[in-house]
Amino acid sequence: MRQSQLFTKTIREIKSEEGSTNAKLLLRGGFIHKEMAGVYSFLPFGLRVMNKIIGIIREEMNNLSGQEVFLTSLQDPEVWKKSGRWDDKVVDNWFKSKLVNESEVGFANTHEEPLTMLLRDYISSYRDLPKYIYQIQTKFRNEKRAKSGIMRTREFIMKDLYSFNRNEKEFRVFYEKCAGVYMRIFDRVGIGKLTFRTFASGGSFSEFSDEFQTISEAGEDTIYVDKKKKIAINKEIYEEGILKKLGLKKDDLEEKRAIEVGNIFPLGTKYSQALELNYRDKDGSKKPVIMGCYGIGPARVMGAIVEIFNDERGIIWPKEVSPFAVHLIQIEDSQKVKKAAEKIYQDLQKQNIEVLYDDRTGKTAGEKFADCDLIGIPFRAVISEKTLVKSCIEIKKRDGKEMKLVKISQVKKYIC
Amino acid sequence: MRQSQLFTKTIREIKSEEGSTNAKLLLRGGFIHKEMAGVYSFLPFGLRVMNKIIGIIREEMNNLSGQEVFLTSLQDPEVWKKSGRWDDKVVDNWFKSKLVNESEVGFANTHEEPLTMLLRDYISSYRDLPKYIYQIQTKFRNEKRAKSGIMRTREFIMKDLYSFNRNEKEFRVFYEKCAGVYMRIFDRVGIGKLTFRTFASGGSFSEFSDEFQTISEAGEDTIYVDKKKKIAINKEIYEEGILKKLGLKKDDLEEKRAIEVGNIFPLGTKYSQALELNYRDKDGSKKPVIMGCYGIGPARVMGAIVEIFNDERGIIWPKEVSPFAVHLIQIEDSQKVKKAAEKIYQDLQKQNIEVLYDDRTGKTAGEKFADCDLIGIPFRAVISEKTLVKSCIEIKKRDGKEMKLVKISQVKKYIC
């Protein structure tokens, strides 16, 4: 992409009040735009990062035999009354509205109920199970306080997978498999080392659920981490009896602030009983389906990445989620440099390397470098008269100091 | 995809009342699920078709130098009051709700206002223009009557491109270019021959807008088509004076019912003036930006395709938007056939051919063929003892009668 044609620009100082590092840097870099408190649009750079994160999640969900659907936001109150979750006293973050005929509708904050209803059309026998179904789409939550930048918003994209199993054993096998896949996802997006599977409170059907918590001062949660065992426990259930049950020792635990980047939750038969999603087992008996849910918020993950990987100059994207692989910068406006830069831009693209090309005229090298550091692409590649003499580009890693002259023909090898 | 693992099934008779052919066939085939009147979820087959259509549209938008963004559904009333479109008397299909603090919010039915506001942060000089920005995402419209299946719903995905130009001349060049790209999109999804660029009423800034109307009895519009000139005129402006101005003759026109699959609309300075999106021109004068909008509803397109391409047995997808390239059917449960079918399934996938593989046991050939015709993939490929003897698959086109034995090694060549 040519930076001269991009409609966004970096912003030196943002107008609105933003407490969080992620919102500040993403707004300044032109990744997002604030519409209201807790409501952000995604601009070209932001959408590219989001799509990278979503792409990784989708790939891993498909490997888990997940089948993707796209459910609606508009919700029929009758479905939610069956589970008791239409009432604002039970679920306090509904956005509700009315159809023209005055009947109420809701905007989905989660999708257990409609998906359970939907499956009644398709599941009747043990032969129809297990099934794993996921969605990646917008949810709405009427948060009292929007905070933490793009990590807690009133409108956000969620990946939710729902599992439908015949029995507890089959469910548990999948649940553990999914927990493993979650760790792989956090590894792939670059936050694996700081992310811990964390015991948290369960529901009526399970003593515990599992959160995936990424250590960061910007987090809203407090967890106790056992670094050796690579697990943690949420403060909400941090007590002697539970520690003992989990085989954790107080002395091995460190208190940390953390961001909840994902969670997986055994639902038991809570929704299948309320909404009558049953199946006929081999022996002819009718049984409720065993369910589980598995969530990751791609924007929450994106926010966490920015909170962790930044310095005083800007964002430092991990390779796998960076909006581009390389930021190509032409720092002199001479015909010779322009022509060479143009050729390299074309060549890199032909090699399927995603390039942001700073072809803007009338900007100093300093201005271009400052923008480059703020945007945070892993590699900066500078072309000037000086580098051209040697048929080279000067490459610098965003998170390093060393500058290296790399032969133009070797660029792909160097950055991939 | 293995049909034995798919969670959806074909449905012989649908429970809900559906007047339209597209909803009937899509519900029966397991492409969509009805949540409420005018509110449909997309199941795996439906989402695949939707993504094919969206993929084509996105490619063409990028070729037009469009930059993709993802805007929010939640809308700040203050922004819409500036253009006068917050009032329910002006826009009668708003869904509105309230934040916890009781202030009002809307759910976007279109995005001219927020995008115009957003661009105030980035456009100030003639050097910042032109810009072309698009989005592909959900919109909400509180329709009085939901009808026509997935073609007029209360929640739907839209592609909207917005153009921002310096002057009328620059705008018109882009507008005509975009009109051409629209025709290419409709060609690519398979409805080009039946789709006509259609003069329709304009707004305050232009006498006409342009609709893209696809001839079908299921359409809500009446148009008059000049087949030779490959253009049409909407009934709403069908009168002597206008015909003369457009150089159309009554005798050359045929009255047709049609589905509006897209429209492009000159907005002039309506929103840039209301929301003060101005730029400084070369001569130093301040001018409002000239805008245009360009919409296509992927679900509307999908509905139109089903309305046009179907027979008494089911849907007949055009190649480019079909959920799969080929429907592989194993019609005998012998080990030999199973093993061969499995191998062909793997081989075709390795050749990047999208295969729906009917590996279900306990279904008759008749049942499998009926499902196959209902789902409507362009090629049916049957494997049986009989075909295996000749190292062949029996291939039949969905829209043909002839069955042909094709060597397994030649399948790709035959269907691509």
Image (cartoon, coloured by chain):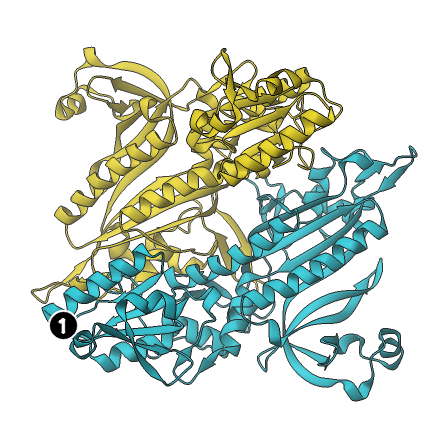
Chain colours: A yellow, B cyan
Q: Residues within 10 Å of mark 1 (few under 14, many from 20)?
A: some
Q: Residue at x 16, y 62 (%)?
A: A126
Q: Which residue carries the number 1 mark?
A: B333
Residue A303: x and y, percent? 47, 29
Question: In the rendered view, does B238 fall on the left or right side of A63?
Answer: right
Q: Using the rendered view, name the quadrant where residue B266 is placed.
A: bottom right
Question: In the rendered view, does B388 fall on the left or right side of B103?
Answer: left
Task: Please indicate, yes or no, whether residue A359 appears anywhere in the rendered image.
Answer: no
How many marks are shown on the rendered structure? 1
Q: Residue at x 59, y 82 (%)?
A: B217
> Disc 1 sits on a residue from what chain?
B
Which residue is outermost to the left? A283
- Depicted B349 relative to depicted B252: above or below: above
Q: Using the rendered view, name the quadrant where residue A363 is placed.
A: top right
- Depicted A135 relative to depicted B366: above or below: above
Which residue is outermost to the bottom? B251
Mark 1: secondary structure? loop
Please tell me which residue lies in front, A379 or B195.
A379
Residue B408: x and y, percent? 26, 68
Question: In the rendered view, does A122 fall on the left or right side of A341?
Answer: left
Please tell me which residue lies in front, B413 or B327.
B413
Task: Please indicate, yes or no, whether residue B61 appears anywhere in the rendered image.
Answer: yes
Inspect the image, locate mark 1, and give the three-letter code of the amino acid beneath it.
Answer: Asp
- Depicted B20 relative to depicted A49: above or below: below
Q: Quadrant of the N terminus of chain A?
A: top right
Q: Quadrant of the C terminus of chain A?
A: top left
Residue B239: x and y, percent? 84, 80
Residue B227: x and y, percent? 71, 81
